Amino acid sequence: MTAYAFSPSDNYLERLDATTAGQQGCAIKKSIVSELMRLRDTGASWLFNDLDSLAQEYSNSMQGNEVFNMAKKLLLVLPNDIIPPELDLDNDGDILFDWSGSRGRMMTIALRNDGRISYAARLSSTKTRNGNDFLIDGLPSEIIELVRAATQQ
């Protein structure tokens, strides 16, 4: 039997083909890599290119930088109905995901290298939301709904 445990800062492909993972681990890694390449070839592939460009702009290797690995995870778990965000890097080294909607609505997520998410949404001149959470198996549903509310037409 093979077991694999993730931690929030893991590069999810790093240890899958280790000798201790056995044949199952290698098969799982091959399947995951194949699916990731398929996803990158879809309409949102330019987002991964933007993330690569952002890493190069700040002289970081995405492969060796935990915050960029976490950003890839976040991009992969975004639901398909959510419009793609603008990407940036803040002064603290967090990756920023920004969405703008009509009538001044906006949503920003700051993602740290340990998976901590800080978010802020402005849904109207009197309605705002903010908080903190963690990216573990996916984005918390509250954050997904805030992005949808901020970007609705």
Image (spheres, helix red, strand yellow):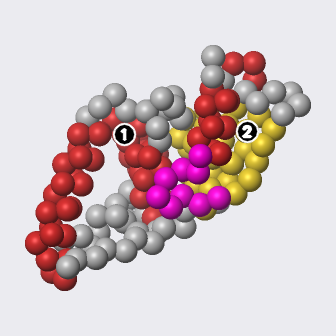
* Picture coordinates of residue 59, whole percent (x, y): 44, 56
Please report the residue visible at 29 percent of the width from the left and 69 percent of the height from the top.
14
Is residue 109 at least partly visible in the picture? yes
Image vertical order of residue 150 relative to residue 27, above or below: above
Q: Quarter of the image for the N terminus: give it.
A: bottom left
Image vertical order of residue 14 relative to residue 50, above or below: below
Is residue 93 at least partly visible in the picture? no
Verify CB contact (< 8 Å) between mark 1 and mark 2.
no
Please report the residue visible at 24 percent of the width from the left and 54 percent of the height from the top.
32
How many marks on residues? Answer: 2
Q: Secondary structure at mark 1?
A: helix
Nearest to N terminus: mark 1 or mark 2: 1
Residue 136 located within the stretch drawn in magenta: yes
- Residue 88 appears in which quarter of the rendering? top right
Of helix, strand and loop, which mostly describes the magenta segment?
Answer: loop
Dot 2 amino acid type: Ala
User: In the drawing, does residue 84 fall left or right of residue 90?
Assistant: left
Of badges 1 and 2, nearer the viewer stands 2
User: In the drawing, does residue 105 fall left or right of residue 45?
Assistant: right
The magenta segment: 133-141
User: In the drawing, does residue 24 fall left or right of residue 115?
Assistant: left
Residue 36 located within the stretch drawn in magenta: no
Pointer 2: what residue? Answer: 121
Q: Secondary structure at mark 2?
A: strand
* Picture coordinates of residue 134, whole percent (x, y): 59, 60
- Residue 150 appears in which quarter of the rendering? top right
* Picture coordinates of residue 31, whole percent (x, y): 18, 54
Please report the residue visible at 86 percent of the width from the left and 27 percent of the height from the top.
125
Dot 1 amino acid type: Asn
Pointer 1: what residue? Answer: 49
